[in-house]
Image: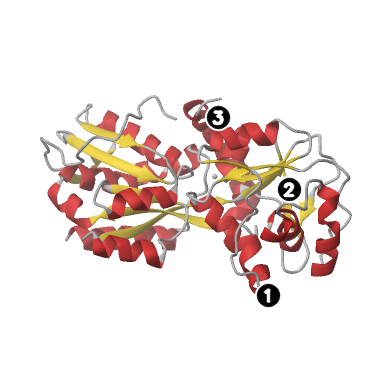
């Protein structure tokens, strides 16, 4: 299933889940093209910064916008881009690519993109690269994701893991020594995990590579603190696994083995929930929590995270099409694309903070 089909399926699944939660309370588009040589529009007209009965008025807006970065955020940016094209009568063209958060920031901080999608906050080294490249930016939170650890539905013996067991399976000390799930039992026991009776089955790992913000987030959640306690020099995922910058390939890897283990953004899991099984994550109290729109939104799912877009201030000032696109992104219409793409909306306070930051940046 390609990304455009996944996005359509994801949106329906998450919309149903969010609707059910509300009732209970009373993670490649065909429009995506190669990156242009320059992101400055040759012809642009300003967005009509007004809201009509139909929403944000983009009539008459013309220009090009180039978005790079996170493959997790990519489906949202694609859908907002498609909406922008519709509302502008085809005048606003948005190109979106998803090489990964890290690779996206390399392009963005060199001045090669208008916007960088990110599944984590910008690192100090990346911020320094932007400074060196003369790129000033605005950080805008746009959604919430639940990094989902998954296996095959045929793996009936593993339903929940804690970070200690994940470290034993996927941390740097497992490299070259843990080829079966059960090979991690000794280290899991040493670390004090109660998940130390893992099955005697081949361990087939698929996940994102180091260019990915989802990789970085997993390291932050499951590897970093334990590696520091054990005085491991580099906190990293074991290198001997099948890595890819393409989430669809990671999903295929997880689906392709009865004994798989991997991690992706929540949207990519939801789209394939019939062929993948989410593994619950034990919280600090030891309770196992599965990812869902509810647990991700309230933060009870331990691997919840915020998703961002970073906007080049100079390019926004020079290109009204960028302003129109970002304004749409943060409008009611644009934010409706978050659950449509399979992710979880921000709380009202965080949405207001992003809108306020963007409004100030435009002034």
- Give me the residue at 37% from left, 48% from top: 104
Residue where numbered disc 3 is placed:
9
Residue 206 visible at all: yes
At x 52% / y 48%, what residue is drawn? 344
Q: What is the quadrant of the C terminus in the image? A: bottom left
Q: Is residue 56 above or below residue 271?
A: below
Neighbour class for label 1 at 10 Å: few (<14), some, many (≥20)? few
Q: Position of residue 357 (x, y in %)?
A: 29, 62
Query: In terms of image quadrants, where is residue 312?
Result: bottom left
Q: Which residue is mark 2?
A: 279
As displayed, is residue 56 above or below residue 345?
A: above
Q: Quadrant of residue 273?
A: top right
State how far apart marks 2 and 1 are (Cα): 25 Å
Left or right relative to 350: residue 182: right
Q: Report which residue position mark 1 lands on.
A: 229
Asked if the residues shown at circle 2 and circle 1 are in contact, with their CB atoms under 8 angstroms apart, the answer is: no
What's the CA distance linking mark 3 and mark 2? 21 Å
Identify the residue at horizontal 53%, vertical 57% (top origin): 216
Left or right of residue 45, residue 343 in this image:
right
In percent of width and height, residue 342 lies at 53, 40
Q: Secondary structure at mark 2?
A: loop
Q: Is residue 316 left or right of residue 186?
A: left
Q: Earlier in the sequence, mark 1 or mark 3?
A: 3
Looking at the image, is mark 3 or mark 2 nearer the viewer?
2
């Amino acid at each position: 299933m390609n990304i455009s089909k996944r996005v359509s399926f994801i949106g329906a699944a998450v919309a149903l889940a969010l609707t059910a939660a509300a009732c209970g309370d009373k993670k490649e588009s065909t429009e995506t093209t190669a990156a242009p040589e320059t992101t400055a529009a040759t012809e642009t007209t300003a967005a009509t910064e007004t809201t009509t009965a139909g929403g944000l008025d983009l009539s008459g807006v013309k220009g090009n916008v180039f978005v790079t970065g996170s493959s997790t955020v990519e489906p949202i940016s694609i859908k907002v881009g498609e909406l922008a094209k519709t509302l502008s009568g085809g005048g606003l063209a948005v190109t979106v690519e998803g090489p990964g958060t890290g690779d996206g920031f390399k392009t963005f901080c060199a001045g090669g993109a208008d916007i960088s999608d990110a599944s984590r906050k910008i690192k100090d080294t990346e911020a320094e690269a932007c400074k060196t490249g003369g790129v000033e930016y605005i950080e805008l939170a746009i959604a919430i994701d639940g990094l989902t650890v998954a296996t095959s539905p045929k793996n009936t013996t593993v339903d929940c893991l804690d970070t200690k067991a994940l470290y034993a399976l996927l941390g740097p000390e497992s490299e070259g020594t843990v080829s079966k799930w059960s090979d991690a039992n000794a280290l899991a026991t040493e670390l004090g995990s109660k998940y130390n009776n893992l099955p005697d089955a081949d361990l087939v790992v698929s996940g994102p590579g180091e260019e990915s913000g989802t990789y970085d987030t997993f390291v932050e959640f499951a590897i970093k603190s334990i590696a520091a306690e054990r005085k491991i020099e580099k906190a990293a995922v074991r290198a001997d696994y099948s890595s890819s910058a393409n989430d669809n390939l990671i999903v295929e890897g997880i689906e392709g083995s009865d004994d798989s283990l991997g991690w992706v953004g929540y949207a990519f899991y939801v789209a394939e929930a019939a062929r993948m099984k989410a593994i619950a994550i034990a919280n600090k109290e030891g309770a196992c929590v599965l990812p869902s729109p509810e647990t991700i939104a309230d933060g009870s799912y331990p691997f919840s995270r915020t998703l961002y877009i970073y906007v080049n201030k100079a390019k926004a000032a020079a290109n009204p099409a960028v302003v129109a696109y970002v304004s749409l992104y943060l409008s009611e219409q644009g934010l409706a694309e978050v659950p449509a793409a399979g992710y979880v909306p921000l709380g009202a306070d965080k949405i207001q903070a992003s809108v306020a930051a963007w409004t100030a940046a435009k002034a």
